[in-house]
Image (cartoon, grey):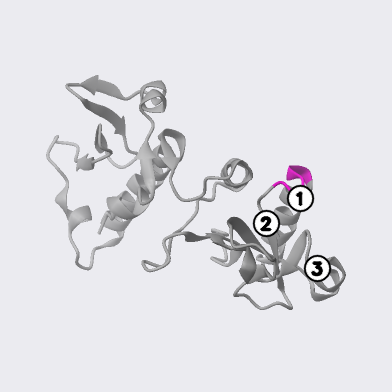
C-alpha cells in the first residue's frame, strides 16, 4: 500500500518551494502532475495550505489506478509502479517541504549532503520515537547514520538542554582514540565498539563531519 503519510511525516509544505518546483496554485491548493515511466501512467499530488496531501495515480486510459492503495498482496507490476511513485514523492518531500524534527542548521546541512551525494533520505522507523531517524544504504539496507534529538545529559554533559546528534560507524581502533567526551562521544544506544556519537552543534566542522559520514557509508557496505 502506498503510505503517503509516512513519506511526509514530520514535514510541512514550503509554499515558495512548491511554486518553484512547478506546483500550480488553484483556490488555495497546490497541484503537481507528472508522467511515470510505466506504460503512460501519471500521478498528481495536491497540497492544501495546511499541508494536507492527496496523491492519485492514473493509468494510460486516464482512470485512477487503485491497486497501489490497497492493503493486500500485489504483483510485480503494481510493486514497481508503487516504488516509482514513492521515489517521486520523496523527491518532492525533500525539495518542497521543511523538516519539522531536526532544526539545527548543521543537521539540515548534513541531510542535504546525504541527499545530494547518496540519494538517501531519513527514515522514521519508530512511531513512539518520532524524533529518531536512520539513513541507510540502498544496496545493503544497513544503517550508516542514526540521527536523533536527546538531552545533553545522556552524553554525560552537565547540561539539560537538548541537542541533535548522529551516531556513525567506525573501526574500533579509531573510535578508541577518537572519543574524548568533548567533540566525540561513545555511541548513543548503539554498539560502542563500532559506533560513536557527534553533536550537530558546530563543535565538529562540516568538512570533518561529512568525511566521517562518508567513512560510515563505506563501512555499511559489508
Quarter where residue 137 is shown: bottom right
The answer to whether mark 1 and mark 3 are in CB contact below 8 A is no
Q: Which residue is mark 2?
A: 199
**Residue for point 25% across, 21% down:** 25
Few, some or many residues within 10 Å of mark 1 (<14, 14–19, 20+): some
What crowding class fits label 2: few (fewer than 14 Cα within 10 Å), some (14-19), or many (20 or more)?
Answer: many
Q: Which residues are magenta?
A: 202-207
Q: Is residue 4 magenta?
A: no
Q: Secondary structure at mark 3?
A: loop
Residues at marks 1 and 3, CA–CA distance in whole angstroms: 13 Å
Instruction: Return the residue nearer the eye: 67 or 129.
Output: 129
The residue that label 1 is drawn on is 204
Determine the residue positioned at 58% across, 41% down. Answer: 112
> Left of 27 or right of it: where is 47?
right
Residue 215 point in image, percent of width and height: 74, 58
The quadrant of the picture occupied by the N terminus is bottom left
Place of residue 12 in the rendered image (x, y in percent of width and height, measured from the top left): 36, 40
Q: Residue 179 shows which numbered tag?
A: 3
Answer few, some or many: residues within 10 Å of disc 3's Cα (few below 14, many 20 plus, some between 14 and 19). some
Question: Considering the numbered disc 1 on the image, is that residue within a helix, a strand or a loop?
Answer: loop
- Whether tag 3 and tag 2 are in contact, CB under 8 A, the answer is no
Q: How many marks?
A: 3
Residue 174 spot, x, y in % from top left: 84, 69
Q: Judge from the rendering whether residue 158 lies leftward or rightward of residue 83; answer left or right.
A: right
Residue at 27% in and 30% down: 33
Amino acid at each position: 500500500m502506498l503510505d503517503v503519510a509516512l513519506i511526509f511525516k514530520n514535514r510541512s509544505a514550503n509554499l515558495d518551494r512548491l511554486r518553484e518546483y512547478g506546483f500550480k496554485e488553484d483556490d488555495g491548493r497546490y497541484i503537481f502532475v507528472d508522467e511515470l515511466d510505466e506504460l503512460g501512467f501519471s500521478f498528481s499530488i495536491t497540497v492544501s495550505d495546511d499541508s494536507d496531501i492527496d496523491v492519485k495515480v492514473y493509468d494510460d486510459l486516464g482512470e485512477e489506478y487503485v491497486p497501489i492503495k490497497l492493503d493486500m498482496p500485489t504483483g510485480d507490476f503494481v510493486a514497481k509502479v508503487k516504488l516509482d511513485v514513492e521515489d517521486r514523492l520523496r523527491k518532492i518531500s525533500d525539495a518542497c517541504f521543511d523538516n519539522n524534527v531536526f532544526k539545527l542548521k548543521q543537521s539540515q546541512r548534513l541531510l542535504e549532503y546525504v541527499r545530494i551525494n547518496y540519494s538517501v533520505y531519513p527514515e522514521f522507523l519508530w512511531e513512539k520515537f518520532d524524533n529518531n531517524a536512520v539513513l541507510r544504504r540502498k544496496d545493503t539496507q544497513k544503517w550508516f547514520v542514526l540521527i536523533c534529538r536527546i538531552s545533553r545529559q545522556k552524553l554525560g554533559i552537565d547540561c539539560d538542554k537538548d541537542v541533535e546528534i548522529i551516531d556513525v560507524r567506525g573501526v574500533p581502533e579509531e573510535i578508541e582514540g577518537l572519543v574524548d567526551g568533548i567533540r566525540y562521544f561513545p555511541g548513543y544506544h548503539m554498539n560502542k565498539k563500532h559506533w560513536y556519537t557527534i553533536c550537530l552543534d558546530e563543535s565538529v566542522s562540516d568538512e570533518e563531519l561529512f568525511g566521517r559520514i562518508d567513512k560510515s557509508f563505506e563501512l555499511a557496505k559489508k
